[in-house]
Structures are given as structure tokens and as C-alpha cells.
Image (cartoon, rainbow, N blue to C red):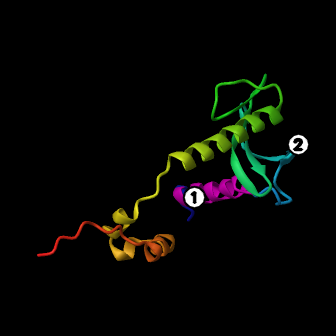
Amino acid sequence: MISTFSLQQTQFEESLDKILLPPTNPNAEVMEILGYKLVYVGGACPRNYRVYTDDSMIGVIFQHITHWSNGVDSLRYAEPVDAAVGLDDFMNVARVSKATTEKLPTEEELLDKEFDALTSDEWERLKRYIPAAKHLVAA
């Protein structure tokens, strides 16, 4: 006897397989536009597309009846390439702003961390670290 749950689980897994198809899969519905690959995920209105540059997914754009949009701004685009470029530009700016606002811990802060919690990069920084000489007072 097939339970309703197992039937729903099977249908869910099959739909996930279709949604997660890479742009290189021959069964994927792919639209190639000026440096981007749009892979249809699902939906009727809006239709959802994953946007790839090379082999990296940068986000999702949506095809409405009258326009295209992306998930990062409230603009309406006439062409899918414009929505993809807007998304790509936003992601590039977000990467840059994250990199400039992200501060590495100082060596003094690293010394306060547990040894097991240190990354290999942090270990390398600590190997090269020479503490500043404090004023020594003879007793």
C-alpha cells in the first residue's frame, strides 16, 4: 500500500531534481543572454530563473507578463539581460562592501581564542606575530 506521504515525498523529490538542474544539463530549460545563462526553475507568473555567470549562480530573476525583475531592487526591466545585469551589479557591490567592512581580528584577539578554533590562516598570522615590547620594570 502506498501512503499519501510517500507519494508526496516522491513528487517533491522529482520536482527538486528539476529545480536543481545545472545549466549544463541537457534537460534544463536554458536561455543564454549576453554573458549570462538563465535556467528556468518554475512558476507561471512570475516565471523564476536562476542566473549564472560561467558556472556560478549569482541569484534569481523573475519574468512577469509585462516586465522582468530581480530580488534585489524594485525596478522593472524590459529585457531579461537588464534584470540579470542589475542583479550582477548588486552582488558585486555587496561583495566589495562586505570585504571592506569585514575586519580581521587582531593578533592579540587571536591569542584569546581557543587553539582548536583557529583557522590555518590565523595560525600563520600568529607564527609571524612579534608582540610589541611593553615597558619593562626591574623589580
Separation of marks 2 and 1 at Cα, in angstroms: 38 Å
Q: Is residue 46 visible?
A: yes
Residue 72 or 97: which is nearer the viewer? 97
Q: Residue at x 55, y 47 (%)?
A: 100
Residue located beneath label 1 in the image: 9
Q: Residue at x 77, y 26 (%)?
A: 77
Residue range corresponding to the magenta coloring: 5-21
Instruction: Describe residue 17's horizontal placement relative to residue 114 as left or right.
Output: right
Q: Residue at x 88, y 46 (%)?
A: 32
Q: Which mark is residue 43?
A: none
Residue count near mark 1 (Cα–Cα under 10 Å), binned few <14, some 14–19, many ≥20: few
Earlier along the polypeptide chain: callout 2 or callout 1?
1
Looking at the rendered image, the quarter that the C terminus falls into is bottom left
Residue 8 or 64: which is nearer the viewer? 64
Between tags 2 and 1, which lies in front? Answer: 2
Amino acid residing under circle 1: Gln
Is residue 19 on the magenta stretch?
yes
